[in-house]
Image (spheres, helix red, strand yellow):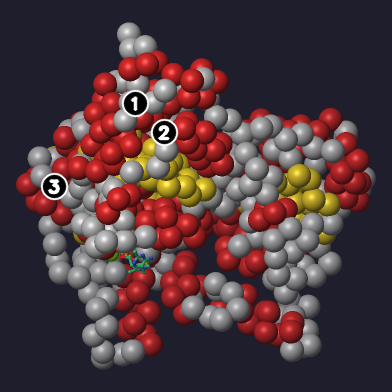
Amino acid sequence: MATNAQYSVAAAIARFMASQGVKRVYTLPGSHVKAICAELARAAIRIVSVRHECSAVHMAHAEAHLTGQLGVAIVTTGPGLTNAVTGLASAYLARTPLLLLSARVPDPQAGMGALEEVPQGDLVRPVCRYVRAISDARHVLPALHMAATTALGSDGPSGPAYLDFDPSLLKQPIAPWHLDPRWFTPAARTPRLPDAHVIERAAHLLRESRRTLVIGGRAARGTGTSLERFLRDYGCVYLDTRESKGALPPDSPYSIPALRGRAIAEADLVVTLGRRLDFELAFGSAAVFSESARFIRIGRSAEELVENRRGDVEISADVGSALLALLACNAAPKTSGLEWRDELVRVNAEKTAKMTASSVAAPSGTDRRMHPYTLIDAINRFVDKDTICIVDGGDILSFARVRLNAHTYLDLGPFGCLGSGVPYGVAASLAFPSRRTIALIGDGAFGFSAMEIETAVRSRARALFVVANNDAWNIERQDQVVKYPGQDLGGDLSACRYDRLAQSLGAYGERVEDVASLDAALERGLANLPAVIDVAIRRDVLSADGKAGLADVPPLHALPAWDEAERLATSGATRPDQ
Ligand SMILES: Cc1ncc(C[n+]2csc(CCOP(=O)(O)OP(=O)(O)O)c2C)c(N)n1
Ligand SMILES: [Mg+2]
C-alpha cells in the first residue's frame, strides 16, 4: 500500500479518479499523458484505447449520460486535444458531465515553437464549464475537485470540464499535506429544494389550467413514478424530448408524441422539466406556443429557468424535488373535465395505430430496397426494457424518433454530431455489459468513426451496430435534389459494404438486402457481438424531418412552419391557427 509520501501528481490524479467511482477512461496514447494512464492502470481503472480522440470524448459522454456519473477522457497534447473539441462541443450542448484531461507543452518551452503547441485552454474554453492549466502540485486536487463539481452542475448547467498539466509536473511528488483525505471523497451536486411559496404559486396555476402540457428535459430522467403520478393526477399530457427519452416508458398513457405541434399550440399551461426552450421547442415563442399560455419552468440553471421566455412561475430546484413538492399540495385542476387531455390521448393513439399499420405495410421501393420503418420495426422486435438504443444519422434519426420503441436512448444530440453513434455504442456496452446495446446508424454517420469497430473488438464491447445504408447523406441529398436539380453537391455516397469493413476489423458482419432475412441476420449479429449488420434501405422516402424542412435552415426558427408563424406574428398579422 502506497503511503501519501510516495505519491506523484499522476498517482494523485489516479487516486482521485478511483475515489470518484471512475471505472473506465477513454484515451488514445500520447507521450505527454502516459504518466497519468500508467497510474490509472495501476489503480485498476480500465484504459479503453480508441482510434480518434473525438471518439474518446463521445465515449465518456455516453458513459456519463447512461450512468449519471462523470465520464472521463484523456487526450494528448496538440492534435489530440484539437480532435477532442467536437466531442466537447457536443457534450457542452447536451449538458453532459464529463472531465477531459490533457497535458500541454512543457512550460519552459511554451511560446518558443514547441512540438504540438497550440493554445489548448483557449481552444476549449467556449465549450467547457471549467478550464484550468495546472503547473503546481498544490493545485492538482483542488482543481480536480472544482472540475468534477462544476461538470456535475453544482452551481450551473452540467457539462464538460477541462484540465491540462505540464508533463513534467505529472511525475513530481506531491507532498502529503496536499493529500487531505477530503479531496478523495466523491464530488457531488448540491441538492436544491424548492421554495414553498413558489410551489404554492405553481400549484395555483395547475389548479386553474384546463390544458396542461408537460415537456421533459434532461432532469426528467430518474423521476419516473413521481412524473407518472403528476401527469395522471393533474390531468396533463406529456411530450418527451430527446434528452428526456427514457423518463417514461414509450407506451406511457399520457405521452402524445404524434401530436407535438397541436399540444404546443393549444396548451394553456406548459410545464418544462429541466428543459431549455431551445430550437427544438421553437425557443418558447409566443407565435408557436399559445400567446396566452402560462409557463411553469423548473430547473437549476438560468438556461432552464428563464432563457427565451420567462416562466410565470420559475421553480429553482431539482426536478424530482419540485415534482414531489407539487404532488404534496394537491394541485389537481379545478375543472372536472379533462376533455382536452382525453381527446389528445385518443387522437394520438389513432394516429400511432395508423402509422404502425402503414409502416408494417411499407412496400419495398423501386430500387427493391426496404423502407426504413421495416428496418426499425425489425429492430423493435429485439428491444426490451433493458435495451440501450443509440441512434446517429440524418433521415434515419428522424424515422427512429418516430418509430423506435426505446426505453433507454441516446442520439447525436442538440449539436447534431454525426459520428457519435459508434463510440456511444462501444461505451454503452462496456458500461452495461449485461444489457443489450443496439446502435442504429446511417451509412454516412457510420463512416466518421467506423474504425471504432476495431476498438469494440479489442475492448470486447458487445454492441450490435446496424447500418441503415442508403448510399447517401440522404437527408441532405433529398434536399439538394429538390433545390439544386441536376447539380452534384456531394449528397451521394458509394455503395460500400460496411459488413465487410467490419469483418476486416475482426467483428462479425453481415449484409441484408431482403426483408425475409432481416430478423435472422439481427439474431446472428446479437449472437456474435460486436457485430455490424449492413442493411440496404430505400433512399426515396421522406422522413418527418425531411418533410418539415429541417434542411431549409430558415432564419428565425429550425422549422419553416415556425419561422412563418413568427414572421406573421411580428408583422402584426393573425396567426394561421387563429
Ligand atoms: C459532423 C457533421 N457533419 C455534417 C452534418 C450535416 N448532416 C446532417 S444529416 C447528414 C446526412 C447523414 O447521412 P447518414 O448518416 O447516411 O443518414 P441518412 O440521412 O442517409 O439517413 C449530414 C451530412 C452533421 N450534422 N454533422
Ligand atoms: Mg445514409
In this view of the protein, can residue 128 be seen by the observer?
Answer: yes
**Residue at x-position 34% and y-position 82%:** 480
**Callout 2–callout 1 Cβ contact below 8 Å:** yes
Instruction: Tell me the crowding category of disc 1: few under 14, some 14 to 19, or many 20 or more residues within 10 angstroms, Cα based.
Output: some
Question: Which of these two is toward me, 132 or 268?
Answer: 132
Q: Secondary structure at mark 2?
A: helix
Q: Identify the amino acid type marked 2.
A: Ala
**Residue at x-position 48% and y-position 49%:** 131
Q: Identify the amino acid type marked 3.
A: Ala
Which x, y percent locates residue 262? 68, 64
Residue where numbered disc 2 is placed? 137
Which x, y percent locates residue 37? 27, 32
**Residue at x-position 74% and y-position 84%:** 570
- Nearer the camera: disc 2 or disc 3: 2
Residue where numbered disc 1 is placed? 173
**Residue at x-position 21% and y-position 31%:** 460
Question: Which of these two is toward me, 11 or 299?
Answer: 11
The N terminus lies in quadrant: top left
Which x, y percent locates residue 51? 20, 47
**Callout 2–callout 3 Cβ contact below 8 Å:** no
